Image (tube, grey):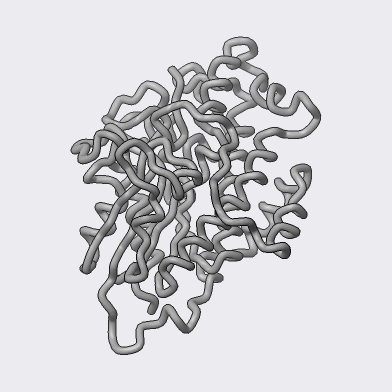
Amino acid sequence: MAARFGTGSSRSAVTGAAAPERPAPVRRRAAGLGAAALGGALALTAAAVTPAAAHPGPQHRPQHGRPAVHYVALGDSYTSGPAIPAQVDANCARSDRNYPSLVAAAGRYASVSDVSCSGATTAEMWKAQGTNGPQLDAVTRDATLVTVQIGGNDVGFGSIIATCAGLSVTAPTGSPCKQHYQASGIDQLTVNVVKTAPKIAQVLRAVHRQAPRARVVVVGYPDLLPDDGVGCFPAVPFAAGDFPYLRDTEKKLNAMLRIEALLGGAEYADTYRPTIGHDMCKAPADRWIEPLVPASPAAPAHPNAKGEAIMAQAVTARIGDSGSRR
């Protein structure tokens, strides 16, 4: 059964967004990220970067007490919560128990606009997706808090999961998926992460441009597979050696998102660490991520209601007791 990473439909591994040209210094920085060096570089940088490293600029600080908070949530299906009751938008498979809804319920916000949509890539920040308009259209000058969880579909993790599940039967104790994506001598999934980085940077620049007073929080992806790398074939049909490979790929994606948040004047909410030990290999009572055949209402390889609640806790812990900067 094919599962999507942040989507309800099939997409190519790398999707471009019709966004403005990057300034020359930014292009040079993006070009300098080599695929071969990314694994070590991201690991070292991510270790050095804490969520608090994105310091507030003067324009974000409340001038007279606590201002009204206008919250906008952008994202893919990890944000929208497909199949989690109750679904309030059939086009985007959006749940009223997804983490933006829970964050909104925990705070006193003047307005909330959740435009997250299953299947979204960074391209859908600028273009409509069915009945969902371009997500960036929701980011107006009065927005004071914007959360962004995007990039999984740009990396192509849904098709990766399907490919790796299909290859697992050829060598269940080996690493056929890793061999497949490294057949050229370069890890294609690392390349996908590198190519996604400038797209995330473009999204953050657009958010800041449209909502210059907003506090912007990039939300990472939760722990999908056992953090210790020990698999659970055939319950989750990946070969033994591919569990750590796919785990490391997700960690590279999250490390890239953390770095782009820092470089893009945003903050980072870590949802991976608080979900360790509750991945799709765990027993139904203990897991917050459903496997490829879900036992609780959720999309395959996606958070269930408990997972969305934990991500909401990570976001609310990041923003404190209000969306304005403290």
**Residue 288 can be seen, yes or no:** no
Q: Residue furthest bottom?
A: 64
310 vs 42, nearest the viewer: 42
- All told, the count of numbered labels is 0
The residue depicted at 46 percent of the width and 49 percent of the height is: 126
Locate the C terminus and report the quarter of the image it occupies: bottom left
In which quadrant of the rendered view does residue 66 lie? bottom left
183 vs 228, nearest the viewer: 183
Q: Left or right? Give the position of 250 relative to 5.
A: right
The residue depicted at 62 percent of the width and 27 percent of the height is: 242
Q: Left or right? Give the position of 80 relative to 266.
A: left
Locate the N terminus and report the quarter of the image it occupies: top left
Q: Position of residue 192 (x, y in %)?
A: 64, 39
The residue depicted at 28 percent of the width and 56 percent of the height is: 113
**Is the residue 73 above or below the residue 192 in the image?**
below
183 vs 124, nearest the viewer: 124
Q: Position of residue 260 (x, y in %)?
A: 59, 58
Q: Residue furthest right?
A: 185
Q: Position of residue 142 (x, y in %)?
A: 32, 71
Q: Left or right? Give the position of 126 relative to 90.
A: right
The residue depicted at 64 percent of the width and 58 percent of the height is: 22
